[in-house]
Every structure is written in C-alpha cells, then in structure tokens.
Amino acid sequence: MKRVPMSLHRALAEAALSDPGPAAIADPTADLALTAQPVLTYATVENAERYRRLMRVLWLEHRHFGLRLRPEEISDRVRELFGLALTPEEVNNHLKQLHEWRAVEREHDSSLASTPKEYRRSRFTYDITPAGRRVEELLAELDELRGRGGALSGSRLPALRDALLRLGDTLAEEAPSAGALRSMFEQIAGELEQLHSGALDFMRSLDRVVARGELVDDAEFERCKNALLEHLQGFRRDRNRHEGEIVGAIVRVDRLGIERLAELIVSGEEIPDLPSAPAARVRVERAIELRQQWAGIRSWFIGSGRTRSPWEVLGEKVIQAIRAILDIAEAIVDRRTGRADRAHACVHLAHLAASGDAQAVLATALGTGHPRHVGSPQPAATHIDGHLSWWESPPAPVVAHLRRPGARSPGAGSGTPIADTAAAGRRAAARRQAERQELEQALARFATSAGPIRLADIGRLREGDFRHLLAWIGRAFESGKDAHGARHAWSSDGRARIALLAPTPDRVTIATPTGTFETPNYALEVTRR
C-alpha cells in the first residue's frame, strides 16, 4: 500500500479548517440578473447564416475535442462543410463581431511570428465560449424542429445553396468521389422536395384565405397579422438574397456536365447483374433517372423556356399573400368604421331569418313587400272612365300625413365614405387579362386543323395549359356520351367546344411543371366558334 504524501495531508487539513459547512438553501431566482444576452445576437441579425456557419465549425471542433483554430482554418472548414467561400477580410470581421457578442473567445497567436514586428501583429486563435456552446445546442434543436415542420420557410435556402456549391466544387475535381456526389445530390433533392411540399401547402392555404377573406374573425386576424406579414416578408427577403447564388450554382453544375455527374454517381453504386435486369441496362436507366431529376431541379428554379418556373410563381404568390393580408386588414378597418360589409350583413340576415318568420324578414330587408309610400281610398260607387287623362279626371284624395312640405327625408345626413377601389379594380383587370391570355394560349395549343389530338402527342404542358385541360376533362365527364361515345364541354368563355373521344387501351404520362399526370390516352378535339 502506498503512503499518502505529506503535501496532500496538509492540503486536506487546510480545506477542513476553511470549510464553512453546508450553505443555506437560497431562492433560485433571487440573485438572477435578468439582463440582455448579446451572445444570442448572431442568430438574428442580417448575415445570420454566415455567423451561424462560423459558430457551427467552432462548436463541432469543440465537440470533437479539437484545438483552437486560426481564421484561415475556420475559413477552410466552412468551405468544406457548407461550400461557402469567404474572403480573409470577411472571416476576420465576422470573428471580431462574434467576439464582441461574447460568442467566441480569442487568444493572441505568436506561433508564426519570426520577427518582433510580426509578433506585435494582431493574430488570434479562436474557440467557442460556454455561452456560445449552449446557444448552438439550442439552435441545433430548433433546426431539427423546423425541419420536421415542412412549411414554407426561407431557412432551407442556405442549406440548398451550400449543397449545390459543394456539388459544383466536388464535380470540378479531377477524381471526385462518387459516394460524396451521390450524398450531395440526394441532399439537394430532399431539400427541394421539402421546399416544394411547403410551397404547395402555402399556395393551397392562400387560395382558401383569399376565398374566405371577408369572413375572417377580427380578433383572430389581429393576433396573427403581424406574425404572418413578418414571416412572408422574411421569406421574400431570403428568396431575393439567395436566388442569385442558387441559380449560379446550378448553371455551374450544368457547365461541368450533367452526363459526367450521372456517370460518376452510377459508377459508385453496387448494381447486381440479374437475368431479368442486366447490370448494364440498370446503369443506363439509373443515369437517365439522375439526369431527369437534375432537369427537374433546374426547371424548378430556372424554368424550361416555355413555362415559368415554380420558383418565379412562388415569388408572385408570396406577394399576392401579402396583398391579401393587407386587403383583409383594410376590410376589417372598413367594418369597424361603419362601412358596408356585405358578408357580415348577409350572415346577420340569415340568423334573423332562421330565428323567426323567414319570409317576413327577407321581405322587409329586400323591400319585396306591398308598397306603403302612397295610397288613396277607392269609392265603391264611383266609376271613372279609364280613357280620361289625369287632368280631366276628378281629383283623388291623398292622405294628409303623407305630404309634409319642408320635412327632411328619412335617413338624411352625411353619407358613408366610399372606399377607393381603384387599386383593387386594376388588380382585378390585370388578373382577368392574364386569365384571358392563358385561356387563349391553351386554345391555341390544343386547337388543330388536323382533327382530334391524342394526349400522348401533346408533350410537356405549361401550368396554365394543364389547368385548362383538367377543367375541360372534368366538365366533359359531367355530360353524357353522344351516339359516337364522345363527351362534350365548352371553354370557360364559351368560345370553343371541346370533344373528349374514347381512349385507347394504353395509358400516357404527361409532364407538367408541378409533376407528372398519368391518364388514359384520350383524344381531344377543340373547335373554335
């Protein structure tokens, strides 16, 4: 058994003499200084995505028990992990700002100094502070919750941009890793799928809000109005900020070669050679699938030339949502100031009709009862020739209380101010003009002088053409078949007659900007009036 050193005996004795005993239990909130926490600032300012990437590098380095990092090393890690290239000046300025917010700590770095002048230069190494680690852990949990939400959010755009930049950098290498390319490609497809799903949910919700705008509850709208506007305007700012970088990264990958990208990814996959599915054929089909997926990614942001991209349509829908919220707010102001509100007036009238004599209530409200503004007694024994003029006929007595010279008319006074609907009228006119142009394009696409056209022969459809095609097919199925087995419908403006002829046994798949549509191979004949 080893003996305990005397120095340790002395230290234990001093600690025992200086031990004050158990401390009194204090109130955990008594000594809290509830002041501002500047360490949280980097996650909410304008360049938060840059600050967060620098902090994430330092946080990961600390979790992996790494050492303090120089600005050059931090810049390299950011480029490797996120594909974000920052200049040395930008990195130093961002780290200096993070140090002022107490998110990172720095120490003077003299390891590279070889002269007294270089020793006096401001060179530092950086590490994340305990407060910064707690903030990064919280932000990681919040990012996970937000990723599960699937709603429309601009937070996915930096991750999508970083993945595209890393894909371009890896593809530009002489011998890129097939596994890394596949992982990046799948990440891009997954991020875009989530963004596309959120965009579709947002557009459907927007249509419901616009349709029910006059029935929105005042108190509920006031509670969520500012949050809605802030969220939509924030997404619009994120969209405008990252659009150029995302499009530039996509164009760069196009220049590096999509065929080469598909071949490299397929070369790293283990494909068994089966009798029913030879490996060579599976590799060719897999390469075609990857090229089609990339074409979908490219068309989502840039478009296919013939149609607008969903990215552009989404931007317009966001602006439309902001305008819809402002229109609802204006309608609520009109409602509170006593201006006419047809929706609530009709709802109130329906409640009155349901609680009493509906016929009497509606007759009174709509003025459909018997006239009471004039009347005169009819002598039973007096017969007046119907061919006499009023000048030659005997005078008809008029009830005295109906004639009051000088009295004011009922309801006289200042009228309700008339709302200026010029802006809404211009928007409605522009919307109607766009709808007419879209219908004209659809008619021009499907109306041919060669007779009926099969759906298998129409190729890729624009969004407007696809919407009108579905509407025509739906209206055609609302009617019965004629003697030849065809169904008929009219266009929305009544200027074209649509005939839906019997399909062939095969099925066709039609490509659209929002996906693919599988249907029987009907024949469509559009005839203009």
Image: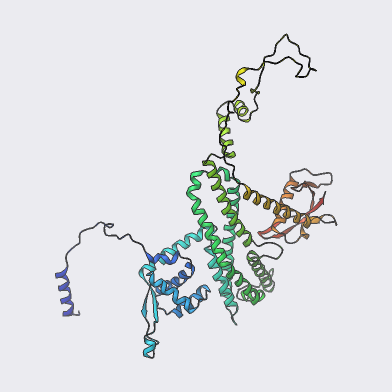
Position above or below: 505 against 291: above
Residue 122 pos. (x, y %): 39, 82
Residue 103 pos. (x, y %): 39, 70
Residue at (41% x, 63% y) in the render: 138
Residue at (60% x, 46% y) in the render: 420
Closer-to-camera residue (361/473): 361
Kindly give the residue lying farthest to the right in the view shown: 450
Residue 2 pos. (x, y %): 20, 80
Tell me if 316 is positioned left or right of 467 in this view. Answer: left
Tell me if 453 is positioned left or right of 291 in this view. Answer: right
Closer-to-camera residue (366/514): 366
Position above or below: 495 against 363: below
Residue 295 pos. (x, y %): 66, 67
- Snapshot quadrant of residue 300: bottom right
Kindly give the residue lying farthest to the top in the view shown: 381
Q: Is residue 521 visible?
A: no
Its colouring scheme is rainbow
Residue at (57% x, 65% y) in the render: 240
Tell me if 291 is positioned left or right of 412 in this view. Answer: right
Kindly give the residue lying farthest to the front in the view shown: 406
Position above or below: 387 against 88: above
How many dots with numbers?
0
